[in-house]
Structure formats: structure tokens, C-alpha cells
Amino acid sequence: MPQRIVALAVRFLPRGAVRDRYRRELLADLAVVDHRGRFALQVLLTAPRLRRATLALTPDSPLEDVVKATKPFLCRTNLHHRWEMAETSDGEEFIRCAKCLKEKWTGLGNDRSVAANVIANYGSIN
């Protein structure tokens, strides 16, 4: 039964390579999850949103296989961000929003140290 629900959900997607790819991926995921019925229902409930995301892709886009993520509403309106400490691949720390990944301005060029972020965004440490 869960396989039929997933097959029904995939029918919401546009025909062609996108539909085939998601069908294979979702059926593979279904094979390894513990609660197959719950997983199948979640796939069915989110199918319209996935359809909108896949239709938004342009056919000539180099990233046509990647679904664009949307920013959370509060981040998009710049009303509220969830700031966190993050680290670059070379070990430098900086501040970014955990939801939309927006970085805070450091004010010191390429220097992304914790102290530079604190001073630039909150004034003096003292």
C-alpha cells in the first residue's frame, strides 16, 4: 500500500526525467525507512509543494536537477533571523542565520573573526 501512495504522489510531478528521478528516489527511501505508511503519507502531502518547486525550474538551467529552497518568511522580510556561530573551511568563525544562511556584515573586509563580527554588529565589546 505505501508503494501505491508514493506512486500516486509522484503523479503530481511534471512528466519526464524529473518525475522518473523522484519516483526512483522516493521508492528507494521507502525501502529503508521504518514507518513506511507515515513516510508515504508525508510524501503525498508534500507532493503539491514539490510540484511547484520543480515547475519553477527553467529548462535550460544548469541546476535543473536541484530544487530551489525558499527563505523562511521572517528571514525574507528581515524581521527575525536565528543567528549562530559558523566556521569556514579554513577555521575562521563568523555569524550567520541558521535558517537562511545570511551572514552578518563584519565591516573589516575579509576578516571574519568573532571579535570583528561582534564589534561591527553590536558596537564595542565593553
Image: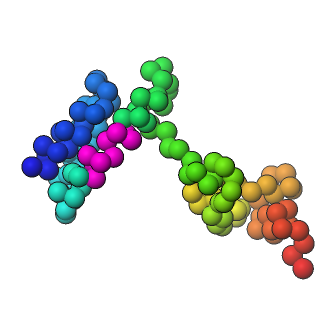
Q: Nearer the viewer, residue 45 or 120?
A: 45
Residue 82 occupies which quadrant of the picture?
A: bottom right
Residue 119 occupies which quadrant of the picture?
A: bottom right
Q: Residue 109 placed where, x, y %?
A: 85, 51
Residue name at image x 90 percent, y 72 percent: 124
Question: Can the viewer see residue 69 in this picture?
Answer: yes
Q: How many marks?
A: 0
Q: Is residue 43 magenta?
A: yes
Dominant secondary structure of the magenta stretch?
Answer: helix
Task: Examine the rendered structure and indicate whether residue 93 appears above or below residue 51.
Answer: below
Question: Can the viewer see residue 101 in this picture?
Answer: no
Asked which colour scheme the image uses, the reply is rainbow
Quarter holding the C terminus?
Answer: bottom right
Task: Examine the rendered structure and indicate whether residue 88 appears above or below residue 47.
Answer: below
Residue name at image x 33 percent, y 46 percent: 46
Q: Residue 94 placed where, x, y %?
A: 71, 62
Residue sitting at the far bottom:
126
Residue name at image x 26 percent, y 46 percent: 44
Q: Residue 49 placed where, x, y %?
A: 39, 41
Q: Is residue 73 left or right of residue 56?
A: right
Residue name at image x 61 percent, y 55 percent: 74
Q: Residue 40 placed where, x, y %?
A: 21, 51
Residue sitting at the far top:
60
Task: Examine the rendered structure and indicate whether residue 99 appears above or below residue 28.
Answer: below
Residue range of the region highlighted in magenta in the rendering: 42-50
Q: Is residue 45 magenta?
A: yes
Q: Is residue 49 left or right of residue 93?
A: left
Residue 48 occupies which quadrant of the picture?
A: top left
Residue sitting at the far left:
1
Q: Is residue 81 left or right of residue 51?
A: right
